[in-house]
Amino acid sequence: MIVRPTQNLLANKAFDIEFLGYLSNHAKHAIVALDRLNASSERIQEWWDQYTGLTPYGLSLHPVDQPWDKVKPCTRQEWEDWRGKKVNWQEMCAFMQTQLDEDFDGNTDMLVKEYAPSLIPGMAGALTHGIIHLGWGIDAQSPWMTIEGLAYLNFAYLGVDPSEIAIEEVGSETPMETILRKSKEISENNLTETWVTATKAKYDETFHSELVPAGFQWQLAKTLHEPHPVVTNVPSWLRDLPLETIWEHLYRTVTHIYLATRDAEDGHGNFLILHGLTSLWGLEHVCGVIGDEETTRRALQQYFAMIVCLLATSTSGFPSVEALEATLADFSADRTEETEWDPIVLRGIGEEEEHNIKLVYVAKELWTRYSHWAGFAEAARTFTHTPNIGPSSTAFKT
């Protein structure tokens, strides 16, 4: 279990889960990563004080609206009725706390087993920060952060309808071969225009009006609502391969995509795609607690559909076959690297941009777990930029 000042910071209840109406509060994610990277207690507290004073976006966090002792827990019916409507997050947290105390005797694993399975299909909400918050809270063994994460997943729920996802028989196709085929299909069928652009244009501001100020999140909601078969047809290896093999393949595949989409001028990483890696880490921890194979397979199918939709909807578009193949050539599956991690870790610990701290933590863990694959080490060195964020005009510098 994480100790030092970290558990107290993760239990902090001073700030709302979002600010400016749609930006996720990332403070606790960085605290988990800093602790795992063995940052000093002083650095952990310093980073918290800086971020909660003023975020790297130049915007301040939003304090909670009500004192917690005045918050009335919602009912189970309200919990379900409010799903995805981005209202009453504090009441949802209070409900989770009551459930934890009264129904599960303080056992957060049982709380997660009960509530997370129905929430996982909405993991695309808040640009995956609900599943990140929950999974990273589980990683840190923080009861309050776990409660916050469950409530955030419910609050921001958004995803492809599970009933639309279908298994596509692909034989012996590898995960990267699947991604290459999807890229080719999107390009050859001009899906950027015929599906993405057309779908974006169909809806006015009455559609998910709560997301209109969020810009890209609003556009993503449209394509998730009307997904093309390129999204909903998921490969049969998600059904057939051993789960431990699927996790490794997905981590390697998302890392390949992250490296394939590096900026041509300065090599910085793609901000959106980085979330594919940190949300997969979160999802793995959530599924680990649920402990049910079929639930995990369905979650991974949903994750795969989400990633394809996210990439296709992004301003940069789905990565080209050429870019993906070049990265595959540079970072073959058997290319290892005996990385000197100290400079990378020190650089991560010193970062103001919390996404890079999380990137170093996850990439280092994956490098250790999966035979020192060079792609993970390269990803850890590929920092992203802080996005230029403002109402309706978010620019991710991708």
Image (cartoon, rainbow, N blue to C red):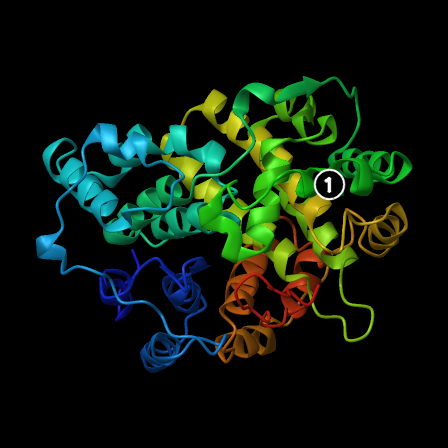
Residue under numbered circle 1:
196
Q: Quadrant of the N terminus?
A: bottom left
- Quadrant where the C terminus is found in the figure: bottom right
Relative vertical location of residue 214 with respect to residue 241 in this rendering, above or below:
below
Looking at the image, residue 273 sits to the left or right of residue 194; the answer is left
Query: Foreground residue, 258 or 365?
Result: 258
Name the residue: 32% across, 78% down: 45
- Residue in view at x 36 percent, y 63 percent: 28
Residue 147 x %, y %: 27, 46
Q: Is residue 60 left or right of residue 148?
A: right
User: Position of 42 compared to 282: left or right?
Assistant: left
Q: Is residue 369 visible?
A: no
Q: Secondary structure at mark 1?
A: helix
**Number of residue marks:** 1
The location of residue 265, given as percent across then percent down, is 81, 74
> Where does residue 363 sit, x and y in percent of width and height?
59, 58
Residue under the image location 75 percent in, 36 percent down: 195
Would residue 222 appear left or right of 198 to someone viewing this image? left
- Residue 362 lies, with reference to residue 186, above or below; the image says below
Vertical arrangement, residue 152 with respect to residue 44, above or below: above
Mark 1 surroundings within 10 Å by alpha-carbon count, few (fewer than 14), some (14 through 19), many (20 or more): many
- The answer to whether one can see residue 374 in this image is yes
Residue 191: x and y, percent? Answer: 81, 37
Amino acid type at circle 1 is Val
